[in-house]
Amino acid sequence: MRGDLKTVEGQFEMTEYVALVGLEENEAEAIRARITQPVVSHVILPSVMVKDGDLYIESNGRPPYVKVSKLVFHGIYDDDLDFISALNLWQTCRPA
């Protein structure tokens, strides 16, 4: 199920990414072009988890999860409770 919290030991990259969730590809590309930090983007809710206060998000490749330092979440989904709950547990999350 997408958006579930998952525990996957030893499969994380330590580089911190900006995560874009809920933006169309052209919108994500416009943001990606303006920042230097690596970006991972998802049109629909990705799998996420919080480990030791850090947010990890599905990466669309290897490693399967990457650490997130900033997140743009645009949209409301019928099944976003797990995703929003993970954001609530993430120590960095502050609503804007």
Image (spheres, rainbow, N blue to C red):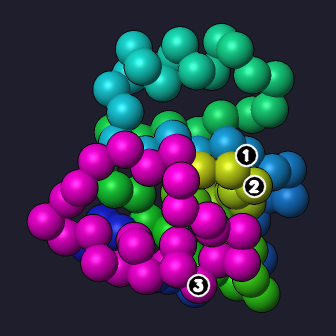
Q: Earlier in the sequence, mark 3 or mark 1?
A: 1
Reading the image, the residue beneath label 2 is 69
Mark 3 or mark 2, which has the lower sequence index?
A: 2
* Residue ID for mark 3: 89
Can you tell which mark lies on residue 6? none
Picture quarter containing residue 82? Answer: bottom left
* Residue 62 visible in the displayed image: no
> Do residues under tags 1 and 2 come within 8 Å of each other at their CB atoms?
yes
33 relative position to 36: left or right: left
Q: Viewed as shown, does residue 27 lie left or right of 35? A: left
Image position, residue 83 (x, y; %) = 40, 71
Residue depicted at x 59% and y 84%: 89
The answer to whether 70 appears left or right of 20 in the picture is: right
Residue type beneath disc 2: Ser
- Upstream in the sequence, badge 1 or badge 2? 1
Residue 89 inside the magenta-drawn segment: yes
Looking at the image, do the residues carrying marks 3 and 2 touch, with CB atoms under 8 Å apart? no
Binning the other alpha carbons within 10 Å of mark 1 as few (below 14), some (14 to 19) or many (20 upward) gives many
**Residue type (three-letter) at the residue carrying disc 3:** Leu
Asked if the residue at tag 1 contacts the one at tag 3, i.e. Cβ–Cβ closer than 8 Å, the answer is no
Label at residue 17: 1
Tell me the magenta residue range. 72-96
